[in-house]
Image: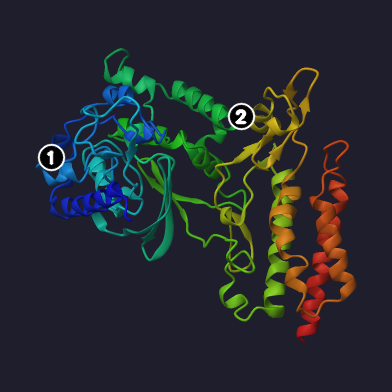
Amino acid sequence: MTNDHTVRQKRTVRNLEDGVRLCGRPGAQAEVAGVPRTASLHDYPPPLLSLSSRRKFAGWFPVYGARDPCQAAGIGITHGCRGLWFTSGGFSPQLDQEPLSEDQPVLPLPRLCGDPLFLSFQCQDYRGGWLVGDLCEDLCVAGELLYQRCLYYERGKKVLQAQWRGRPVVLKSKREAFSSFPPLGMLQEEEAGQRGQGVPEAELLLVLAGEVKNALGLELPNSSMGPLWPGRWGPGWRRQLASAWSLLQQEEYVHLSLLQGLSRHVLPVLGSCGHFYAVEYLAAGSPQHSALFPLGQAAPRGGQAQAQAISHIALSFLDMVSHFDHDFSHRLHLCDVKPENFAIRSDFTVVAIDVDMAFFEPKMREILEQNCTGDEDCNFFDCFSKCDLHVNKCGAQRVNSNLQVICDKIFRHWFPSTLKSSAVSFRLRWQLQQAVQECTDLEVSTGNWRAAPSVFWKLRRLLQALLKELQEAEK
């Protein structure tokens, strides 16, 4: 039997969709909702709110059942009907309405990830002078930046695929609403008349350096801040500053901007509009692909062509590992290694497309050095440390490595299964399988990864030999 409130939920979603279609004016957002621009539901991510919490936020969100279709559809700062709530006893027309009991949970309606209404809000804020960016004109005026589909939506983070002047791109932000980012304090002081006209650039750079240090653990000279700061201010300098500040509070944007032009293994930032920034679209990997990554025309029939492609990709992974370990002033640690966080270019270059969980050495040490009662307390996703039981503190030094995790999460899927039907000698297949196993293993006695330099070069040599055998068999 269908659950009663599941039926109500479906009915209400249909009503909301009707309301969205009927709402002819996205600009009605502020007047209809009658709520502060700064209020945003995704600032309070827990899925269940107590009655006292509902009362605390009462009046901030649109009310279901309102006569105005814009309001009923959830148009407002909640973006995509996120201000509408239902309970196990039915839908609540407002957050603090009785007869809800204290222990009766209130659940949010499903988030509408693919709801393009947020672009209307973004453009409304652009036209209203709240935000700027080099992509805003194409998004809001010229129609050159077109929404296509939602790729990811969780706890406010939104990743969208779009078409920009004929090329596929990805729009990203770790929060959905521009207003949900904490404003720059000195800008508020300037607007309130608590300081003179304008904000000194030297003071801004000092604040910027502090934000970078907080986000990445890096102390950078002012000369390195160019990619992160708009530089010379125009007539709308306040919104330029506010937009830049919303981007600076997103660690991935800071990473990508600082690495712009320095690494072929990360995505370049193409532009921004307010708190959303654009990067190149590349098809992500997935465990559903037999080769983990979509190979397309490179290996349409699998077999030897697929084995060759995988060999090229594996060598590029090794190149990326060496690059992140040695080519920057600090080692760059990848703490979330899975196919979905990487993509490959047509020349088989591996690109890290999600670096939310990438950390330079100083930040990595800060994250790992936590209190503990055992080694399991010292595992931060794919980055492991050891617990010193004498002081109940995790060591600041990571005991595994990018290569070890990539061998475990990527290479073990490929070798030897990918090579079974290919024209590769048994001896080489066995050596490669053994090398991948050696790369993956941790020493039980010490918890340290063994033979790091030698395993790297062994894998590289064996993969090059594999590629050579495959190419000769093709002749």
**Residue for badge 1:** 66
Where residue 34 sits in the image (x, y, percent)? 16, 31
Q: Are marks 1 and 2 in contact (CB under 8 Å)?
A: no
- Name which residue lies at 14% across and 48% down: 25
Where residue 182 sits in the image (x, y, percent)? 38, 27
* Residue 327 placement, left or right of 22: right
- Name which residue lies at 86% across and 60% down: 434
User: Mark 1 falls on what kind of element?
Assistant: loop
Total numbered badges shown on the rendered structure: 2
Q: Is residue 233 visible?
A: no
Where residue 277 sits in the image (x, y, percent)? 42, 46
Relative vertical location of residue 138 with respect to residue 208 in this rendering, above or below? below
Mark 1 or 2 closer to N-term? 1
Viewer-nearest residue: 466 or 155: 155
Q: Is residue 192 visible?
A: yes
Where residue 118 sits in the image (x, y, percent)? 29, 47
* Residue 278 placement, left or right of 267: left
- Quarter in which the N terminus is drawn: bottom left
Quadrant in the picture for residue 395? top right
Q: Residue furthest front?
A: 1
Q: Residue furthest left?
A: 67
Discs 1/2, front: 1
Task: Identify the disc placed on residue 217.
Answer: 2
Residue type of the residue flagged with mark 1: Ala
Q: CA distance from mark 1 to mark 2?
A: 48 Å
Task: Identify the disc placed on residue 344.
Answer: none
